[in-house]
Image: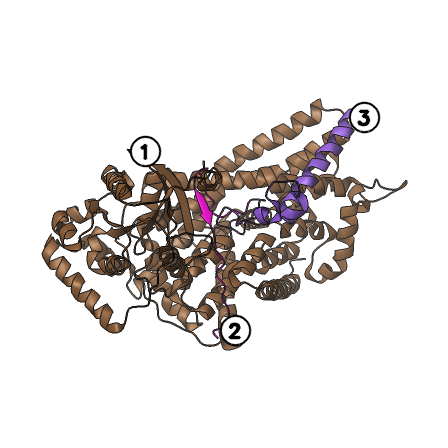
């Protein structure tokens, strides 16, 4: 059941908007109320768009809950805050004015958060105040008189611990009584609102002070652990070193921890190939299953453990509250190339996928700051590139240790990620000096308290990643591999052919057409074939290489791992060139579409595609020629 | 093994249609649906650009009753 289906039946559920400052727990409360599983994390700016879900209250009201991006004020300064303002004021197209507003605040930080409530009160809409994270407030000795606050404000006040579902029943009861007093079936018009003057803002601050004095019985003590940790983690020298060490550990773990589960998956894939090879008679179906589907899809499934390990680290850092510290640490470096410190979190999100990273730029207030961040987001190594890196590193970099026990493969992986980051910073610097001058703003970001990562959050996050990865394999990668198998199998080779059948196929023709263009950077026609479907999704290139080499080889080569086949077929220079290509090459088509939507123009998407393509070609060319000169041929 | 060859080609046809469904504009492939083109152009669910081929966006909703409405947020040079 969705709000849309209810609307189709002529019934409009009551609409309640969850509004509040960033990182006050709105999405956690939303998930608790609706049973949703929207992403939550311990840093501001996780939610950048409006989400809705349905719930039934204890007395049977059907309520559509809107989860909105965090905002300290209705005076929106960034695109995500503008969404919140427009929905609350009923100005957003496709939206009607919410019937009531639930203002979610962090009970440990009322001084900063109550101003938004006062602004919301001025709108004259039904309002409930939620003091979330009450457990942390109480642990710090903070005592708030809920009754006094409610009396002073003249609105219901509820305390909750959204993560533990505590206080939710009280909130639902308050929603019920509010809805009983409010007509929800009439369509209210947009609110005529003007930005408060500086004098009005000062008045809000004075009112907040008065409220705190009358309702906060004891302020408690500021959290010592966070301050002590920050003394080390934000230290000008120790801080960046710790950040670097954490990232380094992450990439080492990606290789060393994943070895055993990858071997199991590999053995299963090879076993299945051999079983089918023995039991199926020669036919197109046998070739499709073994050379097309299993060689292609099996070559990608194997990377699931590494992707999960990478995300385990990212989720732990997100949930602990370290991410904003990392943004703070990176601000000096990023501002040197004209990037806003707020760009750090979108760029970090791009390590998962560039699309949520590009969406997350909505938290950046200035349009030029935002545009630069969007344009460099694809240079962050997304998880789809991980299979390509791992495949080539495993094939060409020996699994040895250097400098007293550091894994060489992990070191190379770290280097590839670092190259992407350095490339992004250089491109940002160049754009800032040329096309996109001006608009630099200082970083202003609330540092959340450190928290133990929530095990359920982390496990659900990993489950979601696994599901997304497997869904991609079962949908786009599988479909592309089937089509690629067809293109690689037909037409049949002519009589007396001396090359493998794929050489004469449609795919072979495409590969051979592109080969002269790619020959200067060391790519053969097989790589050229893999690059084309790799535009749809990067990991498809690995699957495509699996299929292409399965169809290029003899029967005995079927059970060979792709890494072994590549190690025998390519030179080191070619492998390094392909790695350099993948550090810079344009993202998948979905990313270009996301850039188009966020910039509202195909011009910037085309610009991004062109500059990345040129960068990739130049980087691959230099890498290939240098490697050849050093004897990597 | 004619039937096995036929099955392989059928799988290829289905995969091709699945890809076309993912990448071609919805209006070209779902013209028979109720509500006309306007209904098909409704904002897609999911935090991504709505590509049904499964972008790895972590914000894709996981519960049936949760909907994400993404508004276009244009950017560009300051006027």
Indicate the chain coloured purple by its letter: B
* Total tally of numbered discs in the picture: 3
Q: Residues within 10 Å of mark 1 (few under 14, many from 20)?
A: few
Magenta residues (range): B53-79
Considering the image in quadrants, where does the C terminus of chain A appear? bottom right
Q: Which residue is mark 2?
A: A430
For marks 2 and 1, the one nearer the N-term is: 1
Colour applied to chain A: brown
Q: Are the numbered discs 1 and 3 placed on the same chain, yes or no?
A: no
A252 on left or right of A284: left
Left or right? Give the position of A132 relative to A218.
Answer: right
Name the foreground residue: A105 vs A359. A105
Q: Residues within 10 Å of mark 3 (few under 14, many from 20)?
A: few
Q: CA distance from mark 2 to mark 1?
A: 58 Å
Q: Nearer the viewer, mark 2 or mark 1?
A: 1
Where is B18 relative to A397, above or below?
above
Q: Which residue is mark 1?
A: A60
Q: Residue at x 27, y 59 (%)?
A: A116
Does residue B1 appear anywhere in the picture?
no
Mark 2 secondary-structure assignment: helix
Residue A333 horizontal/vertical position (percent): 40, 68
At a point 53% along the width and 32% down the height, the residue shown is A264
Query: Disc 2 vs disc 1: Cβ atoms closer than 8 Å?
Result: no
Q: Nearer the viewer, mark 2 or mark 3?
A: 3
Q: In the drawing, does residue A218 fall left or right of residue A271?
A: left
For label 3, the residue is B2
**Rendered residue at 38%/65% (across/down):** A341
Please identify the dominant SS of the magenta region.
loop
Quadrant for the N terminus of chain A in the image:
top left
Q: Is residue A584 left or right of residue A16?
A: right
């Amino acid at each position: 059941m969705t709000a849309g289906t209810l609307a189709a039946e002529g019934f409009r559920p009551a609409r309640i908007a969850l509004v509040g400052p960033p990182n006050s727990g709105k999405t956690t409360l939303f998930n608790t109320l609706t049973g949703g599983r929207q992403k939550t994390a311990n840093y501001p700016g996780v939610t950048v768009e409006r989400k809705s879900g349905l719930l039934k209250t204890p007395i049977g009201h059907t309520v559509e809950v809107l989860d909105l991006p965090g905002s300290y004020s209705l005076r929106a300064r960034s695109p995500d805050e503008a969404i919140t303002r427009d929905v609350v004021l009923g100005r957003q197209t496709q939206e009607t004015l919410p019937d009531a507003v639930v203002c979610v605040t962090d009970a440990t930080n009322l001084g900063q958060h109550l101003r938004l409530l006062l602004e919301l009160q001025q709108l004259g809409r039904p309002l409930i105040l939620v003091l979330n994270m009450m457990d942390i407030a109480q642990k710090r000795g903070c005592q708030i008189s809920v009754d006094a606050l409610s009396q002073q404000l003249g609105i219901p006040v509820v305390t909750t611990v959204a993560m533990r579902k505590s206080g939710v029943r009280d909130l639902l009861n308050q929603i019920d009584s509010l809805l009983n007093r409010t007509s929800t079936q009439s369509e209210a018009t947009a609110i005529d609102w003007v930005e408060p003057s500086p004098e009005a803002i000062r008045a809000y601050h004075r009112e907040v002070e008065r409220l705190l004095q009358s309702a906060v019985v004891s302020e408690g003590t500021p959290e010592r652990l966070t301050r002590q940790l920050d003394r080390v983690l934000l230290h000008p020298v120790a801080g960046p070193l710790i950040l670097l060490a954490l990232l380094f550990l992450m990439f080492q773990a990606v290789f060393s921890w994943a070895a055993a589960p990858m071997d199991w998956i590999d053995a299963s894939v090879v076993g299945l190939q051999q079983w089918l090879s023995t039991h199926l008679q020669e036919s197109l179906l046998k070739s499709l299953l073994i050379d097309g589907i299993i060689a292609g899809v099996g070559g990608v499934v194997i990377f699931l453990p590494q992707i999960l390990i990478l995300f385990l680290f990212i989720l732990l850092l997100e949930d602990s509250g370290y991410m904003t510290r990392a943004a703070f640490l990176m601000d000096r470096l990023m501002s040197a190339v004209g990037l806003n410190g707020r760009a750090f979190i979108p760029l970090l999100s791009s390590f998962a996928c560039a699309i949520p990273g590009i969406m997350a730029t909505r938290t950046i207030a200035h349009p030029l700051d935002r545009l630069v961040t969007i344009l460099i987001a694809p240079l962050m190594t997304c998880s789809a590139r991980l299979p390509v890196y791992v495949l080539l590193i495993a094939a060409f970099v020996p699994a040895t240790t250097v400098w007293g026990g550091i894994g060489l493969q992990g070191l190379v992986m770290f280097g590839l990620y670092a190259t992407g980051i350095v490339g992004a910073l250089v491109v940002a610097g160049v754009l800032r000096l040329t096309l996109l001058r001006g608009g630099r703003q200082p970083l202003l970001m609330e540092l959340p308290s450190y928290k133990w990562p929530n095990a359920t959050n982390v496990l659900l996050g990993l489950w979601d990643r696994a599901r997304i990865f497997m869904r991609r394999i079962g949908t786009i990668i599988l479909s592309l591999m089937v089509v690629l198998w067809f293109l690689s199998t037909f037409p049949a080779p002519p009589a007396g052919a001396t090359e493998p059948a794929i050489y004469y196929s449609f795919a072979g023709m495409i590969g051979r057409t592109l080969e002269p263009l790619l020959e200067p950077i060391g790519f053969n026609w097989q790589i050229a074939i893999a690059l084309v479907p790799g535009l749809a999704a990067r990991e498809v290139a690995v699957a495509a290489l699996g299929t292409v080499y399965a169809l290029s080889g003899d029967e005995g080569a079927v059970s060979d791992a792709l890494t072994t086949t590549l190690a025998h077929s390519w030179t080191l220079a070619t492998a390094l060139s392909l790695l350099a290509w993948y550090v810079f090459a344009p993202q998948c088509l979905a990313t270009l579409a996301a850039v188009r939507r966020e910039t509202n123009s195909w011009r910037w998407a085309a610009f991004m595609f062109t500059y990345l393509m040129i960068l990739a070609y130049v980087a691959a060319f230099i890498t290939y020629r240098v490697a050849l000169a050093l004897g990597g041929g | 093994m004619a039937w096995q060859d036929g099955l392989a080609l059928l799988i290829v046809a289905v995969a091709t249609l699945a890809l076309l469904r993912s990448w071609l504009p919805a209006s070209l492939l779902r013209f028979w649906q109720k509500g006309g083109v306007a209904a098909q152009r409704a904002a897609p669910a999911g935090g991504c650009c709505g590509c049904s081929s499964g972008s790895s966006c972590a914000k894709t909703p996981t519960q049936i009753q949760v909907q994400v409405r993404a508004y276009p947020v244009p950017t560009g040079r300051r006027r």
